[in-house]
Amino acid sequence: MIRRLITLALAALIGPALLAGPVHAERVRDLGAFQGVRSNQLTGYGVVVGLDGTGDDNLEYLTQAMRGTAGRLGLQLPPGVSPGLKNAAAVLITAELPAFAKPGQHIDVTVSAIGKAKSLRGGALVLAPLYGADGQIYGMAQGNLAVGGLGVSGRDGSKLTVNVPTVGRIPEGASVERAVATGFDSAEVLRWNLYQADFLTAARVRDAVNSHYPGTASVEDGVTLALRLPSGADVRSSMMAAIEMLTVVPAETPAKVIVNSRTGTVVINSAVRLAPAAISHGKLVLKVDEKINVSQPGAFSKGQTVVTPESKVSADEEGSHIAYEKGGASLAKVVDALNLLGVGPSDLVEILQALKQAGALKAEMEVL
């Protein structure tokens, strides 16, 4: 049975090259996106109140925040008073402002504890502004937190934590106060960007667009296409929607092998090929067996029981094979053949690295 497996494996190694699978067409919207039509990140700083003794407990920046919050509500704390705030926590608020979001619409926010708060469960966020990268206020956040984690502790120091109780969400907890201008309806040139740079794919998208709207698209580089569309939101939106639904056959991805040396995981794509090469793989197995022997004296011999160790060391080389690989064969066939020969993940990584070093592996090799 073992000889049969070895024969099948060697036949696979010297067989014809495995042809790459058919390439499928993809929509333009799945290959890239229009420049400027994007979401924007918002951040803010606030205070969560109503906690059941799981707050920050008199942190300086939390005290200052509470003084500011109380001042906005008309309550002035006496100077020199440092309130205990175990029922409040300082938090960082993050949100994502979608493209074309208008004032009055609502977005979700994530609230994360900054200090030593143990849990945000049961808390409510006090009204806090959300800022964009330009320092302008784009939203206001407020509401009750939904916390999926749970944390409890005892007086003896024992603790039990389920998930992360110091992070919560407020569904539709922020209202949009300012819209972000995209300029898609008035810009002279509208740019479309590929998610992954590729000159051939960019040229194919350009040809697909020009086949429907002649003279509209031109390639600027390996990522960007310049689209000259008529002005006006209504006309331009219709053309953008039609362009996104065009189908294009993208270029074949570059040959690449991804190796995770820690876990032995190997990921390859269909573009990987091999030059003519001979592969030799062998395993040297060392075995050390320890046995304890007990020697009992004869009856009435006045002897003593003696324990004697017995060691047996052996070295065997098993699974040694040499296989010749014709040029042009896909790496997938080589990997299948090596698996039949009993090559483990770590050994496979070593073989691939040796092929790359010898110049037989025609691919970029990335080790994580």
Image (cartoon, rainbow, N blue to C red):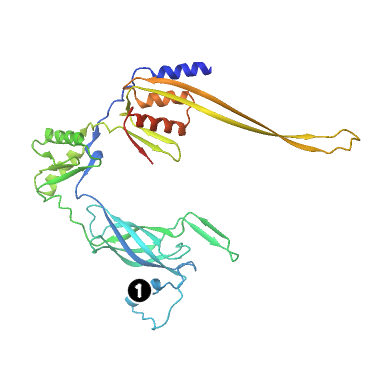
Above or below: residue 258 compared with residue 129: above
Quadrant of residue 301 in the image? top right
Label 1 crowd bin: few (<14), some (14–19), many (20+), radius 10 Å: some
- Left or right placement of residue 180 versus residue 90 in this view: left
> In the visual, does 368 lie left or right of 28?
right
Quadrant for residue 230, please give it.
Answer: top left
Q: Residue at x 48, y 23 (%)?
A: 341
**Callout count:** 1
Q: Position of residue 75 (x, y in %)?
A: 36, 79
Q: Which residue is mark 1?
A: 69
Q: Position of residue 152 (x, y in %)?
A: 54, 61
| Left or right: 140 as drawn, with respect to 57 | left
Quadrant containing the C terminus in the rendered view: top left
Residue occupying image coordinates x 51% and y 16%: 3
Which residue is at 16% across, 41% downward?
A: 221
Left or right side of 353 for 105: left
Image: 244 above or below 362? below
Foreground pick, 222 / 321: 321
The residue nearer to you, when weighing 312 against 63, is: 312
What type is the residue that disc 1 sits on? Answer: Thr
243 in relation to 24, above or below: below
Front-lying residue, 165 or 299: 299
When asked about the image quadrant of residue 238, the answer is top left
Q: In the rendering, at what x and y percent does residue 279 appear?
A: 41, 24
